[in-house]
Image (cartoon, rainbow, N blue to C red):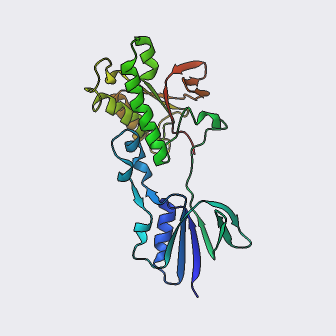
């Protein structure tokens, strides 16, 4: 008799586990995800900066198992796990399992300040990427319409919090499009004058990689025009900007890439 393996999450981990288990005829796989697509998260920053469309980095989960009759894809959100009873609850229905793999991924941590999220969205989903794209492009449009130069300044300030891979990629992409893609599209403002600030609380960018690579990343960002600040811990975030200790940075666009 075949065993049932339930995999919760259709990200990289869950998809890899389901593919491996699908090779065995002795296992029936049930893959559960609250979305019907697999998302290639490393390219989310490209969607956020209008380099790619959401469809370019999302593929239907079902299409990955077209030839696997022993794999069932279930769209839904797991709300409870009964370990003694070996079942998971998905929107009121119970699905039994012999083996359970939980690969739900991660979400950003706001370090005890969940109220910051509305002012500084993270970058983990397509919805967040399109919201960041909207905020970036709207900031330039609003600056173009603003007649007072002093009021344009916070509109053209972009703050990225967190110097890991996501923060580095996002800050670099914002600086790049402001100096290349958008530079000829406006009449009253110069998009290249946009100030992109990357804040990292630690002593260097990309702490998980070798120090020479970290230094190279910071050098490349500086060449793009990104203002990199290390040892800069954010202590406050609101709709009008961020606080770094006693310093206040006025910015209408703040994006969160710090911690999971």
> Percent position (x, y) of residue 218?
40, 33
Could you say which is closer to the camera, residue 168 or residue 176?
176
Up the image or down, 137 lies above or below 65; here it is above
Could you say which is closer to the camera, residue 53 or residue 12?
53
Furthest residue toward right: 84
Kindly identify the residue that appears in the image at 33 percent across and 29 percent down: 178
Q: Is residue 49 visible?
A: yes
Kindly identify the residue that appears in the image at 55 percent across and 26 percent down: 239
> Percent position (x, y) of residue 19?
46, 71
Up the image or down, 152 lies above or below 78; here it is above
Q: Quadrant of residue 155?
A: top left
Q: Quadrant of the N terminus?
A: bottom right
Kindly identify the residue that appears in the image at 37 percent across and 29 percent down: 222
Could you say which is closer to the camera, residue 34 or residue 214?
34
Furthest residue toward left: 184
Q: Is residue 215 visible?
A: no
Up the image or down, 85 lies above or below 218; here it is below
Q: Quadrant of residue 28?
A: bottom right
Furthest residue toward bottom: 1
Up the image or down, 201 lies above or below 246; here it is below
Kindly identify the residue that appears in the image at 45 percent across and 37 percent down: 132
> Percent position (x, y) of residue 173?
36, 36
Could you say which is closer to the camera, residue 235 or residue 57?
57
Q: Quadrant of residue 96?
A: bottom right
Asked if residue 163 lies left or right of residue 233, the reply is: left
């Amino acid at each position: 008799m075949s065993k049932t393996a339930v995999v919760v999450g259709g990200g990289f981990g869950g998809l890899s586990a389901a593919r491996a288990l699908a090779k065995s005829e002795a296992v029936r796989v049930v893959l559960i995800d609250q979305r019907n697509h697999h998302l290639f998260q490393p390219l989310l920053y490209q969607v956020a900066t209008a380099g790619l469309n959401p469809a370019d980095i999302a593929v239907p989960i079902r299409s990955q198992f077209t030839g696997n009759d022993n794999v069932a894809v279930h769209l839904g959100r797991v709300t409870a796990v009964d370990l003694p009873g070996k079942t998971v609850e998905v929107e009121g229905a119970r699905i039994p399992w012999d083996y359970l793999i939980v690969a739900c991924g991660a979400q950003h941590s706001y370090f005890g300040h969940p109220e910051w999220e509305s002012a500084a969205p993270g970058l983990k989903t397509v919805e967040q990427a399109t919201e960041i794209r909207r905020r970036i492009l709207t900031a330039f449009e609003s600056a173009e319409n603003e007649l007072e130069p002093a009021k344009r300044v916070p509109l053209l300030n972009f703050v990225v919090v967190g110097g890991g891979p996501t923060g580095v990629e996002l800050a670099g992409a914002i600086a790049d499009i402001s100096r290349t893609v958008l530079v000829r599209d406006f009449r009253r403002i110069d998009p290249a004058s946009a100030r992109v600030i990357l804040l990292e609380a630690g002593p260097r960018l990309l702490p998980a990689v070798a120090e020479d690579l970290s230094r190279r990343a910071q050098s490349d960002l500086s060449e793009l025009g990104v203002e990199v600040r290390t040892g800069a811990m954010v202590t406050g975030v609101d709709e009008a900007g961020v606080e770094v200790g006693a310093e206040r940075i006025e910015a209408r666009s703040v994006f969160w890439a710090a911690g999971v």
